[in-house]
Structure formats: C-alpha cells, structure tokens
Amino acid sequence: MATSLNEKLTLTPVLKFELPSLPYAYDALEPFIDKLTMQIHHDKHHGTYVSNLNKALEECKERPASLKEIIQNISAYPTAIRNNAGGHFNHSFFWKSMKPKNGEQPLVKLSEAINHSFGSFNTFKSMFTEAATKHFGSGWTWLVIRNNKLEIGSTPNQDNPLMDVSDFKGIPILGLDIWEHAYYLKYQNKRIDYINAWWDIVNWDEVTNNFQRAN
C-alpha cells in the first residue's frame, strides 16, 4: 500500500552529524603534537568519519536518536556505521581530553579514585602507558569506570568501551588515540615518545568532569 503524504511528513528525519570545531588552535598543543598533525587528524580523518557516517545513515533502516544510542547498540548496525560512528565519537571525546600544557594534576576526588584503584598516580600512568604501547595495531587506550572502580584497557580500530560488542566495557573518562595517523608525522614509529609527550597535555579538568558525570 502506498505511503500517504501525511505519513511521509511524520517520519523521523535521518540523523545528521557535523564535524565539531577543535576547542583550541591547531598549534596550541605544540611541541607535544604538531600543527600539521592536528590539521590532518581533525579536518581529514575526523571529517571523513563524519561524512561517511552520514552517508551510511541515509541507507540505514534504523533511525537512531543520537550518536550515543548508535554506539551503545552498535551490534544492530552495519560495519560502516560501527567504524564511522566510533571514529566520530572517539575523536570528539579525544579533542576535549587535551589542552595546552599547564602542569595540571587530577583533582582531589579523581586523584583519590586513581590511588584507590592503582595505588598511586605514577603506577596508573605506568600501567596506562604500557597498555597503550603494547596494543597491537590501531586502536585506543582508555581509562573507564566499571563497577565503581577505575580500569585501564584498549579497544581495536574505532571501537570504544560503550559499544555493546566491546570486550572491554565501561564509561570512558580518558582516551588516547594510538592510530599511527595521530603521531606519525612527528614521532614516526616511536609510539612511546608520543604517549610520553601526551601526558603533558591531558586536560585533567575535563577528565575530572567525565569522572563526576559517571558517578
């Protein structure tokens, strides 16, 4: 039976996403992450994830209400949506997790939680660095809350701990992009140098906010 004009007008529109602006200038994270890497990473890589996600959603029968809904029910969607929704979510999260160096440390409540879960901040930092360094291939390393405790783990490709298909689950409060495009122009194959530099630009205010929202 043909669909009437009125029925067509009441259909939920296909969700459209836009590339968010960086919360700082391209060169704001230098010398830790260089300007050209930030331009390519944000404009080209993240931009492509957004564009491809919108194209994939146009062909999808499901009509999700939000990016988070897609992520949390990713097993219901095709691979193109999994890859590109993950890429959009992860990068949007990543940009906010950094800011120009200012010598910050985690605020009291987050610091206490880190000490409770890992023994000390230095132990946490070493464990996170090791997880990111040893992860094979492309992916992300995360600090998450699960069962009222902080945990460290990694996900492959553009997966994240909110996905229902992820082997490592939790509410992310900090994430590090360990795809080569995130660091190769400056650090080449030295992932460890990139990770060590990244610690100087972690936005602990944002991480603390993520922690408080998750509790």
Image (cartoon, helix red, strand yellow):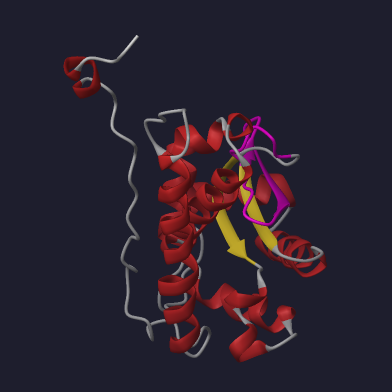
Task: Residue 2 in the image: state x and y as whole percent.
Answer: 31, 14
Query: What segment carries the magenta color?
Result: 145-166
Residue 82 percent coordinates (x, y): 59, 44
Q: In the rendered view, does 101 fall on the left or right side of 147?
A: left
Residue 180 horizontal/vertical position (percent): 66, 75
| Residue occupying the point 72% across, 42% down | 168
Reply above or below: 185 against 44. below
> Which residue is at a point 82% across and 66% down the rendered structure image?
134
How many marks the image carries: the answer is 0
- Is residue 11 in the magenta section? no
Kindly tell me whether residue 124 is visible in this rendering. yes
Residue 100 figure quarter: bottom left
Q: Position of residue 149 (x, y in %)?
A: 66, 37
Q: Is residue 181 left or right of residue 127?
A: left
Q: Is residue 37 left or right of residue 176?
A: left
Quarter of the image where one finds residue 22: bottom left
Between residue 7 and residue 208, name the one nearer to us: 7
Q: Is residue 203 left or right of residue 138?
A: left
Q: Quadrant of the N terminus?
A: top left
Magenta-colored stretch includes residue 159: yes
Asked if one can make out residue 203 in the rendered structure from this viewpoint, the answer is no
Furthest-front residue in this view: 1
Seen from the viewer's position, the closer of residues 114 and 90 is 90
Please report the residue visible at 43 percent of the width from the left and 50 percent of the height from the top: 55
Residue 173, placed above or below residue 39: above
